[in-house]
Amino acid sequence: MQTKRTIFGNKGLPYLLLAPQLIITGIFFLWPAAQAVRQSFLREDAFGLNFTFVGLRNYERLLDSPEYLNAIKVTVIFSISTVILALGVSLVLALAVDRMIRSGRAYTTLLVWPYAVAPAVAGILWWFIFNPTIGIMPYVLEHVFGYDWNHLLTPSDAMILVVVAAAWKQISYNFLFFVAGLQSIPTSLREAAAIDGAGPFKRFWTITLPLLSPTTFFLLVVNIVYTLFETFAVIDATTEGGPAQATNILVYKVFRDGFVGLNFGSSAAQSVILMGLVIVLTVIQFRFVERRVTY
Amino acid sequence: MKLRKIAAASAVSMLALSASAQAQTQIDWWHAMGGELGEKTEAIATAFNASQSEYVVVPSYRGSYAETMTGAIAAFRAGEQPDIVQVFEVGTGTMMAAQGAIVPVYQLMADAGVEFDPSAFLPAVVGYYTDPEGNMLSMPFNSSTPILYYNRDVFAAAGLDPDTPPTTWAEVEAFSRQIVESGAAECGFTSRWVSWAQLENFSAWHNQQIGTLQNGFGGLETELTFNGPVQVRHWDNLARWEDEGLYRYAGPGGGNDAGPSFYSQTCAIMMESSAGRAGVMANATDFEVGFGMLPYYDDVEGAPQNSIIGGATLWVLSGGSEEEQRGVAEFFRFLSSPEVQAQWHQETGYLPITQAAYELSQSQGYYEANPGADISIRQMTLNEPTENSRGLRFGNYVQIRTVIDEEFERLLSGAVDAQGALDAVVERGNALIREFEDANG
């Protein structure tokens, strides 16, 4: 292997070129993050007129509170369900489109549309579709299947609603990557397997899926981060965390406690815990999961 | 040479322009009135600006009540606060406790030397916003109280008298059953604002205590007590009626589904703020609407007492110049004049906040022309308020409202009984009140 080393004379230039990115990271990430850490050790009134240092009490209170433990449980259920649904459906759609010869392009364009819908707008759409009083879906469910849909009262209905709404947003994105991933798998491999007598399922499990694993892994990371942090608008527009906190995921609870409840200490402590969670998740994913991925 | 002259001339004219702009003191007013209410709010500011030339009130819409309040608080923390902010009634505890951040209205008026008579205001409204010494802290702007709306056509179809709204809960149950069984409508009644209408107002209306120390007016050491037998009985009934299909739950917070189910004639009765009147009249196009007072249990001693208010008041934030504060005082005087108040009351359905505005509306013949429009004020002033029915004031009450909704939802889903739900509200609510006391004590 041949390496070519270029020596740049200017010592300051690299720093200058890095500066914009560093400044942005500093202002929009490091500084607020430091503020959050500081606030998480304080107890203050809403206006910030007086505050006292309370050490770890905000954290202790959180870990003692059944509402917080419930939010963790809800987040785990919500994230896993959303990721499985979003990845599963988009993979099926991508496989279907991959088999199309002429109409593939048209389907791809149509399937990408939902991604252009703003999360808040998507949330309102789902709110209308599933509204127990005026929505079309509860009407259909009741008259065709005899199921009394009411996500305002039934926790499982509410969870299904937010999972479907959150996954729907993400399917387009996943679909695009899966289509690209499928196109990069050489057809000769599948043809060779077919000649050797492998059926479509065998070919999928032993050739397509393993060769797709880099894409799948990438999407897994992106989707988990999406469910943890970017589903805020969908939840705010559909269930607002209800009924009785059944869909109150961690990031939504940070918002409710901080910006509605004005309890900045607790809200900051929750953000710090979330930040820690993301760091741990990222390390685990890249250190352990990546090893098992065939590139 | 010529160019320089032009530049100099334009500089002079710029100076003159900015001088004339400076002559008027700008007063920023953040409010939470969207849609039609927002237009009426802006109209008040426009009228004030036209009435004098010293001050300009600049209203700006900041989203929901919670968003407006938290936005103003964030602005205060950054030193960019508006002069006036509209805060909903449950934020009163938080605003009151922030002594360095607000200028009490009685003090503002005295400092500015603007003539101001607190006794002109309706006691039921202003009592909610005074300190224990009777000083007025914020300026009542939009106050309302929940009343009962019903569908006269459905009543007639069900064989009920459309001129007789239910007055007791026993009648609500009987009427609802008749409505549902006759097929006149799918459900009997629904309610917006469960915590406000079916717990807080319910307690006041039945003269039941909401919290110790005069429902929290007496100090931060207060504790919630609304898990008494009367409230438990009512919540127990609501859960049973929801189960039987007589009552339909309309969601947490404002209960946004109540309106659509009333307008679509799915539910025959709706309990909703008196300020919802304009919306109800605009949407109930296919049927006749009737109005009534909130129902009560006739075997409860002291019921009906009087209902309590909701809505918002205007708080003055500290940090404005002396000129700005004077302008705010002038604006408040304008705002509470009978003509402005009477017009606001009649157009929106909010309560008139002064006796004079009420009397003016009477002499204009408004109540004869609009039957039912005076129900709110009659219901609020039905009896001299007791310690239990003056209102309520607790720290962190915005969060406690959420707790009330959550426990009510748990009750309806069958996870807990009425006593258990209200006990949990009291326990979780008291913890929040203690936290507030710690942070503000």
Image: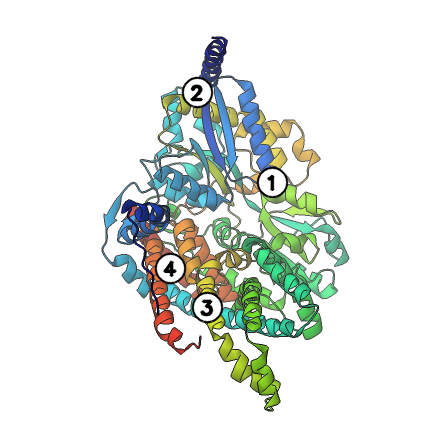
Tag 2: amino acid: Glu
Q: Is the residue under label 4 in contact with that under label 3 (CB below 8 Å)?
A: no
User: What residue does disc 3 label?
Assistant: A218
What distance separates the C-alpha of mark 2 from that of mark 1?
33 Å
Secondary structure of the residue carrying numbered label 3: helix
Q: Is residue A109 visible?
A: yes
What distance separates the C-alpha of mark 3 from that of mark 4?
42 Å
Q: Chain of mark 3?
A: A
Secondary structure of the residue carrying numbered label 2: loop
Q: Residue at x 42, y 37 (%)?
A: B129
Tag 4: amino acid: Arg
Q: At which x and y percent is residue B90?
A: 44, 46
Q: Chain of mark 1?
A: B
Q: Is the residue under label 1 in contact with that under label 2 (CB below 8 Å)?
A: no
Q: Is residue A263 visible?
A: no
Residue placed furthest toward the bottom: A197
Q: Chain of mark 2?
A: B
User: What residue does disc 1 label?
Assistant: B35
Q: At which x and y percent is residue B41?
A: 56, 33
Same chain for marks 3 and 2? no
Which is more foreground, mark 4 or mark 1?
Answer: 1
User: What residue does disc 2 label?
Assistant: B115
Which is more foreground, mark 3 or mark 1?
Answer: 3
User: What residue does disc 4 label?
Assistant: B428
Quarter of the picture holding the C terminus of chain B: top left
